[in-house]
Amino acid sequence: MEYGHTLADDASAARPIFLLGVGRCASTFQQSQLCNADDVWIWGEHNGILSKLLAWGDCVRADSNLNRLSFAGDNSPEAIMGGPLGGNATPAAWLNGFRPTDIDQVERLAIAKLFSIGLPPGKARWGFKEIRYGLNDDVPERLLALFPGAKIVHTLRDPMKTAESAIVTWGYQRFTQIVETDDDERLDAVYQKQLKRWKAGTDYYLDLEERYPDRVITSRIETFRSEFGRILDFLEIEREPDDGNDDGGVVNRGRRRSLEPGSKAAQMLAERRARFAGIVADTAQRAGYELRTLASA
């Protein structure tokens, strides 16, 4: 007998928007643009905490004792606790009302609750941006499964610019030391690591888009302006009349560092573009980038 469930699930009809990408992909700019829509609010990053939440659910669903002693049995309190236990108390000892499908609901409700807190007035359709998913987990695909109305915007930027921006901005002190000591070997390793990260994450999202073409769209920052209307249509967001003004969106200047053109630091990065472009060439071409432009990014 399957006992009646009382867990309310009012989040399955939500239509969240997830801006997901790899590294410094200009997702903050796209976030700011989408927040201009009347009923849309895209939150910032959250350090990838959902991977641990969903991992907890995986552990519950895969637990051998729960599957053998709890999920496979009757979960009716009246049937199990209403009479003498007899010689086998296991059904009572492992009596739980929840089942694996309830874990899905808990995950969905937890995520919806977290990102519905503090929404600005008039903003009902929530979402977030994050650059930490898809490399070592399947969180993006899980989000699509939990929220049938969800859509993903894969935010993308030229691989060489993504790598160099990460090197200069996130590891500025390390990069400065590399330049000062002419540590070419160390810079080679750092540069290649960033490119491999871009390749792995981008391949993941492009594969996801191929499997779910009606739910995942790739948005390259280089063509964002010309394709913004297409993105809005994909997300089913009503377009505002073009008043001719361009506010430029939000740029994360507090986390951006620029190198002096022609400086030693700039030259050291430029020297590696042609040498390492092959690492990302196939993926970059797949994403719509011209190979001849990679070395001169």
Image (cartoon, grey):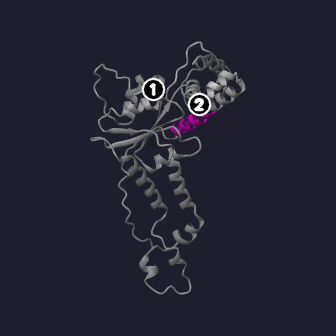
The picture places residue 232, in percent across and down from the top left corner, at 37, 32
Residue 214 visible in this rendered orientation of the protein: no
- Residue at 52 percent across and 41 percent down: it is 211
- Say if 107 sits above or below 274 in the image: below
- Say if 218 sits above or below 132 in the image: above
Circle 2 sits in a helix, a strand or a loop, which is it? loop
The picture places residue 77, in percent across and down from the top left corner, at 43, 76
- Residue at 52 percent across and 71 percent down: it is 70
Residue identified by numbered label 1:
253
- Residue at 65 percent across and 30 percent down: it is 190
> In whole angstroms, how far apart are the C-alphas of marks 2 and 1?
16 Å
Q: Quadrant of the N terminus?
A: bottom left
* Range covered by the magenta-colored residues: 196-210
Residue identified by numbered label 2:
171
Q: Is 285 in front, or is 46? A: 46
Q: Quadrant of residue 16?
A: top left
Circle 1 sits in a helix, a strand or a loop, which is it? helix
- Residue at 43 percent across and 38 percent down: it is 44
Magenta span: predominant SS is: helix
